[in-house]
Image (cartoon, rainbow, N blue to C red):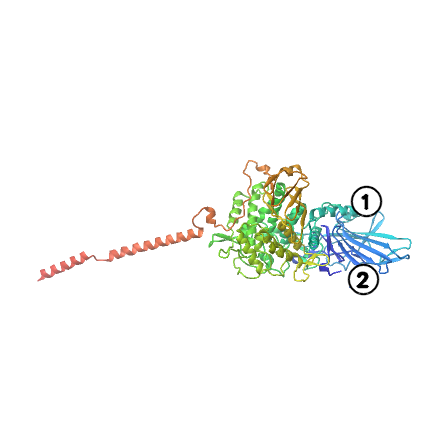
Amino acid sequence: MPNKAVTPTLANGHLGFVVYGDSVHLNGVYNGLKGVSHRARIPNYANIQLANCSSLQTQPKNCRYQLDMRDGKFRTTLEDPAGAFRVQHEVYPNRHFDQTIVNRIHIRRLQSTGLLEVDMRQLMGSKSVDLVDVPSEKLNIDGEEYLLMCTKTKQVEDPNYQKEGHPVCVAYKQVPRKLTLSPEETDRELLYFTIFSHTRQEVEKELKGLKENDHERMHRVEMSRMWQKYGIRVEGNDRLDRVIKASAFYLSSSLPSQSSFQSGSYPFYGLSPSGLGRGGKELAEYQGHSFWDTEMWMFPPILLLDPANARKLLHYRTLVTEAAADYARSNGYEGWQYAWESAFTGREVTPDFCPQVPEYQHHITADIAYAARLYYYATGDLDWLRTDACRLAYETARFWKSRVDYNPETDTFDIGRIMGPDEDHHNVTNSIYTNVIAAHNLFFGSFVGCHCRASLAEASDEEFDEFLRVAKSITLPYNAQYDVHPEYKEYTFGTQIKQADVVLLGYPLEFPMKESTKANNLRLYSMVTRPDGPAMTWAIHTIGHLDLNELDHAAAMFRKSYKQYLRAPFHVWSENGDGADGAGNFITGAGGFLQSLINGYAGVRLRHGKLVINNPRLPPGTTRLFLPELNFGGVKFALDIGQNSFRITFGSGTRESFEKLTLLVDDLERELFDGCEYTGSKNIVLLLRLERDNDNQTSPACTLHDTVLGMRLADQDGRLFTTKQLIVISLVIGLLGVLYSIYVAVSSKRVRGKVTEKEIITKRLRKKQKSKAAK
């Protein structure tokens, strides 16, 4: 087996673990105060192993290991070198009974005739430092005996938002050191269930359900549903096809199933860069925290493939709003400011050794609002907008309205003391990524204000107008000489950067700009991006080159986006491209890679009121790209891309959903109904007729304005001069008036003090006359 960093992770949305690892992690269960909050380590009583093939063996012999992604299982096979027997062991988290890890061991006699013994190990590891130490008790379920441990996590994340530790209950069996096959037996199968729940009642219900139902069939049904959504495939390039399947598998594994035996007592608490099966050590593998990775890298493919789980990801952000409101207030801002790293409570849990990140990297708040905006694009769901998104969009817009600073020199708003996605540079001014996505947030906040007057009773029309006013006048850094966007105000061209930043303006932000500017941005920042930066960078560069029809550059970036980040033999994503392990199971990279396929080569883009597929192409070295299920406006469809054409096939959807959509294929309108199929070669457009708010039928339709920024306030107000210019002009006029008054006064004194020539002559004549008279 490879080392832990490149060993597969198995998960089902409720629990997760690393194969052959001694820890299990539960969704939403953390231990540790503030910056050391991490997924609580629960001893893995389901870590049952064949002794000859176990993780304790440095060089196991006669063992074969297989990750079965189709069925979501890890399989170990031990072949007796003498040919006497074969043992097959498989372990997996059941996707219907999602509180259960299943171990199945099958012993088969081949040539031996005597008693067979197979050595076993149950390696649950040491006691957990995260859980209160309690003794196990016996639990009898219909005559079958288990050991039950019910305890709590030791430390809350923040006593202001969490009053006690998380309850944890585990039911397990002790596995004998040897399993036997008697001389009379040819086969024997043993089944071990290990339950990870929150209460004794949940444990008992799960175990009874397993006995009464065909749990294996139900697991396969859920896996089949998952692959129907995520089963993107290519033909003509087997290596790439395996990479795609591994990326989809690891990303989707940490998400909840479509249905489960019992609804959990915890809602879904989001995706961490290393998934649900990792993050159980302090200050390692992101500790299971949620970052911008969720909304900007993993959310976009999930939204198009699996919108129900996309909604759950957004719902997590609505569970932690008390902490977001307090965070904004403590920093002197209004509205909600989301933490850069968030776990159970939503308070900032970034470790103390990274103080500059929470202090400056504020774009996470707008990233979350942008994901909500995309969800509305994809669904047009006004009910969701009013119940889940209105308050989020409004409060995050309030944050940005209070976060900007007026710059009288430019008559625009600056965002200072900031850090963009390029984490190598902090405390900068006008990070262009931050400025653009903040403007997106403000425009969306104004839009939902039109729809949500009832739920935002304290808001005013003047406030929503102010959102627009601020958004339009946020500074837009641009260098006209080179036709390029500086990453931030102080940026010196040629300075190395960590990862994709400015190039994100083209996709996913889709900020309008000249094609030449987009090309210059891409070329400039390609040359200065760290070669060992995160995988997502090269996925975004792939999409950028495809948008510019630069296919060779796109192919080079596409290969770079995955080849140096995947680790053999199980195609586990790594955070690092330089060969170092980094965070294991880096599903952030998987999410970026899937975007390069869906939004890059397949050309799929979500916009307000429409889904557009432009110029779909094949990835390099392939003859077919097939996306089995995309979702838009409540309708599912498949997209099949060949060498010079594509086929779109529509599946299920309600009659009302189909009636709201208009389909154009190669610019021709087509009839739309369940099962229809069309071919084309250029483009597809699905237009969604957006609902009007029932409470607002008599008012004009709500408008989501295009995101524009960089306007002077004077231009918005229709004034010839800016406020500063008017002040200067007033001062100059006033000064001129004062100077003129002084001039007039001085001139008057001079006139009064002068003797005229006539007076001088008169005086002289009088003097002469007096002299003559005296003589």
Report the quarter where the C terminus lies.
bottom left
Residue 266, how many percent across, how many down? 70, 48
* Residue 202 appears in the rendering: yes
Question: Which of the 4 image quarters holds residue 768?
Answer: bottom left
Picture residue at 76% right of the left edge, 59% below the top: 127
- Give percent across and percent down for residue 529: 59, 60
- Horizontal side of 64 relative to 29 (left or right) equals right
The foreground one among 611 and 702 is 611
Could you say whether the residue bearing mark 2 is in a helix, strand or loop?
loop
Q: Quadrant of the N terminus?
A: bottom right
Label 2 or label 1, whichever lies nearer to me, is 2
Between residue 267 and residue 698, name the one nearer to us. 698
Q: Residue under circle 2?
A: 61
Q: Which mark, by number, is residue 212?
A: 1
Amino acid carrying mark 1 in the image = Glu
User: Upstream in the sequence, badge 2 or badge 1?
Assistant: 2
Q: Which mark is residue 398?
A: none
Q: Decide: is 650 above or below 431.
A: above
- The answer to whether marks 2 and 1 mark residues whose Cβ atoms lie closer than 8 Å is no
Please tell me whether mark 1 sits on a helix, a strand or a loop.
helix
Name which residue type carries label 2. Answer: Lys
Q: Residue furthest front?
A: 644
